[in-house]
Structures are given as C-alpha cells and as structure tokens.
Image (cartoon, rainbow, N blue to C red):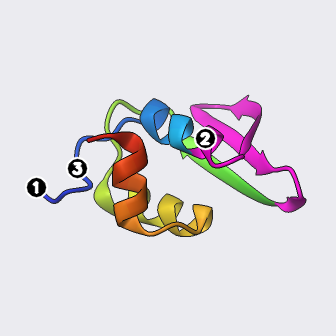
Amino acid sequence: MGRLAGFSGREVARVAEALGWRYKRTRGDHMVFEFPETSIRNLSIPAHRELSEGTLRGLIDIMEIPVDEFLRMARK
C-alpha cells in the first residue's frame, strides 16, 4: 500500500473545496466541481469508499498541487 491508498471520494472533495473548487452537481456516482475563475476545468471525483492510487494521483494533478500538500491538507 502506497501513501495515497485508503482515501475516499468525500475526503478528496473536502480538500478540493478547501482549495477553492466549488461543488457543481452530482452525476451518477461522481461529484463534479468547478474552479470559480475558470469554469473550463471540471474536477469529477468518484463518490467511492476508496479511490485507486492512480485515480487519486490524476485528481491531484488536476487540482495542481503536490502530493505532499494533498496529504497535509487531508491530514492522513
């Protein structure tokens, strides 16, 4: 298990909201967020109990923060 294992979609959504991403809607089992200044980019977070490390790394890339910053904000 890597250091990105064990995060739920809700935990990732909390970090996204803390970074300024705004909840837009739920589509199926995904929470869709948008960044207020640029509505071009959307962040679609699966509402799963546990996200795979690859999926989480992709979401962190879209949020444009380092992994260490994400881990600090998620307090895990």
Instruction: Tell me which residue sits at (41%, 33%) in the image.
Output: 48
Mark 2 or mark 1: which comes first in sequence?
A: 1
Mark 1, Cα crowd under 10 Å, few <14 / some 14-19 / many 20+, is few
Expressed as whole percent of the image width and height from the top left, the position of residue 33 reads: 72, 43
Position of 19 with respect to 3 (left or right) is right
Q: Which residue is mark 3?
A: 5
Mark 2 to mark 1 CA distance (whole Å): 26 Å
Q: Position of residue 9 (x, y in %)?
A: 45, 36
Q: Is residue 64 toward the left or the right of residue 57 in the image?
A: right
| Residue 50: mark | none
Which stretch is magenta? Answer: 16-40
User: Which SS class for mark 3?
Assistant: loop
In percent of width and height, residue 38 lies at 88, 61
Q: Mark 3 or mark 2, which is nearer to you?
A: 2
Disc 2 crowd rating (10 Å Cα; few below 14, some 14-19, many 20+) is: few
Q: Which mark is nearer the camera, 2 or 1?
A: 2
Please give the residue where the numbered disc 1 appears in the rendered image.
Answer: 1
Secondary structure under the numbered disc 1 in the rendered image: loop
Badge 1 amino acid: Met
Q: Pick whichever of labels 3 and 2 is earlier in the sequence.
A: 3
Q: Which residue is mark 2?
A: 18
